[in-house]
Amino acid sequence: MEIKNPSFISNRARALNPSLTLEISAKAKELKKAGKNICNLSAGEPDFDTPEFIIEATLQALKNGLTRYGPAAGDPELIEAIASKQNKINNVATKPENVVVTNGGKQAIYNLFQVTLNPNDEVLIPAPYWLSYPEMALLAGAKPIIIKSSPSNGFKIKIEDLEASVTQRTKLLILNSPNNPTGQVLAKSEMENIAEFLRRNPNILLMSDEIYEFLIDENQVHHSFAAIAPDLQDRIFTVNGFAKGWAMTGWRIGYLVGPEEIIRKATALQSQSTSNVCSFAQRGALAALQGSRDSIDKMVKSYNYRRELLIKGLNEIEGIKLTPPKGAFYAFPQISIQKMNSIDFCKLALNEVGLSMIPGIAFGEDSCVRISCAVSNQTIIDGLNRLKVLMAKM
Ligand code: PLP
């Protein structure tokens, strides 16, 4: 039923863009249902099941009656375990008061934006970016300022571009390494340069989204930004979660780490909006942190193999230029086709060869497409063959 008065919808909601990712995957599903042979390389989540010991711990928590409200900031034992992980694995001095458990990394970002951004504040977002950052900044009344990077330059963030974008209103800078969609991993020296930029700009906060921290090539090292610049800890926020590393996307457990005073505000916001994250699911997350790393290592090995398979295959296709990904489970190649934008190219790929990919425009770079390798080796090979056929026709 159509609404009669458009003002029934708030200005805030009207400004919100529907997710392009969802639109494309809905179209792929529709074609599949209609009997078309579709190869789906648009996935944004692990294809593995959550490790059994995590499920067991959660079932046990349910049987033990952990079915009631809990503290808004999260299960104290889980908070303790996250703080301990931050100290030991990420090398970031963290107390339980610095942590709030959220409904996925997504809510950690949403909460942070809501409690730090005022209307018209500016948020520096290096492109390519995860597509929810600009939308969430807008929801907080702030203005996303997109900092372009060049595919031919390996998507490097240039400090001079950051400097040139700073105004009186600049409030927050977003980093995401390993990156969705490019798979690039920031080197320590690059982070140090960004830390210097922050020292020159004392009123700018930084959010480091480290949700893919474990999913990196063997020869790469993940650095937590807060570990690189301990002197800036009063304005650095770390976003992380269990979705990607432990294959727990549907569990909706993430966390935000930062200065105590702002974490208290994020917790207050949560207490007035969603309350605690599902009590027994948090016990699964606790088991994940306390358990063996074997299941992560196994999945990482698999992603590393698949990433290489994808890189090798893409490099062999004429008309495609790739900055090889070093982490996460995506490749973000540039498609050198004149006069065709990424949406049209992805639509063509779906209709002509039944290949589903995400248009780069969704991540702020219209010359590229995002291809996932969170699928079987066979599916990757199938997708590469279809892409080759399509490119040969262009
Ligand atoms: N940050 C990035 C870069 C992501 O790709 C995602 C999910 O795709 C998230 C955050 C949110 O993850 P979660 O499922 O924990 O909300």
Image: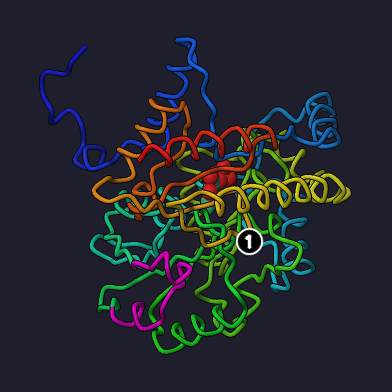
**Place of residue 351 in the rendered image (x, y in percent of width and height, measured from the top left):** 38, 25
Q: Which residues are magenta?
A: 148-164
Residue positioned 63% across, 61% down in the render: 326
**Place of residue 357 in the rendered image (x, y in percent of width and height, measured from the top left):** 46, 38
Residue positioned 41% across, 33% down in the render: 349
Rendered view: 93 above or below 386: below
The amino acid beneath tag 1 is: Lys
In the drawing, does residue 11 fall left or right of residue 384? Answer: left
Rendered view: 147 above or below 304: below
Can I make out residue 150 in this image? Answer: yes
In the drawing, does residue 97 fall left or right of residue 388? Answer: right
Name the residue at the front extreme: 392
Rendered view: 68 above or below 147: above
Instruction: Give the position of the C terminus as an image quadrant.
Output: top left
Can I make out residue 104 in this image? Answer: no
* Viewer-nearest residue: 13 or 159: 159
* Viewer-nearest residue: 6 or 348: 348
Membership of 378 in magenta stretch: no
Q: Residues within 10 Å of mark 1 (few under 14, many from 20)?
A: many
**Place of residue 242 in the rendered image (x, y in percent of width and height, measured from the top left):** 67, 46
**Place of residue 23 in the rendered image (x, y in percent of width and height, measured from the top left):** 37, 30
Residue of label 1:
326
* Viewer-nearest residue: 60 or 222: 222
